[in-house]
Image: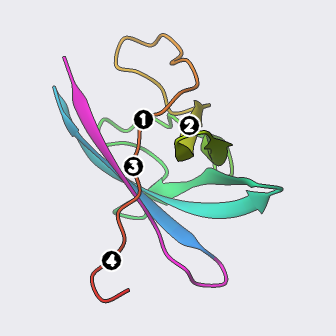
Amino acid sequence: MSVEYVVTVTPAVARPCFIRMEGFQTEEEILCTARENGNKLVLDFKSYADGSVKNIHGVSVYAVGAPLLTLEWLENKSGRTLRTTWQNLGALDGKPKQPGVYFRQDRPQGR
């Protein structure tokens, strides 16, 4: 079982963000807000892509404003690493994921 996560954070003042999940029995997009907390970026649940706070099964999985995950840049000998701390957004098996490197940064074309 695997799911690919794509996180997009826009550089706007309100910092809207999107989390797209696609894989084993999963295809959904979450709208979120990104807020800075020191050197961390916390992604909070806003709604699903259709504007509803309930998933396709009619279930409210996340409360509005609940932190889904936190991204943090860490400096080390080989450069910068993007560490993810999973909060309310979890694994398919329901078990919490350990903090670690799960994402890499891609820059949009032209930047």
Name the residue carrying label 3. 104
The secondary structure type at the circle numbered 1 is loop
Crowding at dot 2, Cα within 10 Å, few <14 / some 14-19 / many 20+, comes out as many
Coordinates of residue 44 in the picture (x, y in percent): 63, 52
Residue 66 lies in quadrant:
top right
Secondary structure under the numbered disc 2 in the rendered image: strand
Separation (CA) of disc 2 from disc 1: 6 Å
Q: Residue at x 37, y 39 (%)?
A: 58
- Residue of label 4: 108
Q: Quadrant of the C terminus?
A: bottom left
Could you tell me the amino acid type at mark 3?
Answer: Arg
Residue 10 screen position, x and y as percent: 49, 75
Between discs 4 and 1, the one toward the N terminus? 1
Relative to 99, does residue 55 appear above or below in the rendering?
below
Residue annotated with mark 2: 84
Q: Could you give the CA–CA distance between mark 4 and mark 1, rounded to whole angstroms?
A: 19 Å
Q: Give the distance between the C-alpha atoms of the residues marked 2 and 4, in whole angstroms.
A: 21 Å
Which residue reaches farthest front?
77
Name the amino acid type tagged 4: Pro
- Dot 2 or dot 3, earlier in sequence: 2
Which numbered dot is residue 9? Answer: none
Q: Is residue 32 above or below residue 6?
A: below
Mark 2 and mark 3: span between their CA atoms?
10 Å
Q: Quadrant of residue 7?
A: bottom left
Q: Amino acid at mark 1?
A: Tyr
| Contact flag, marks 2 and 1 (Cβ < 8 Å) | yes
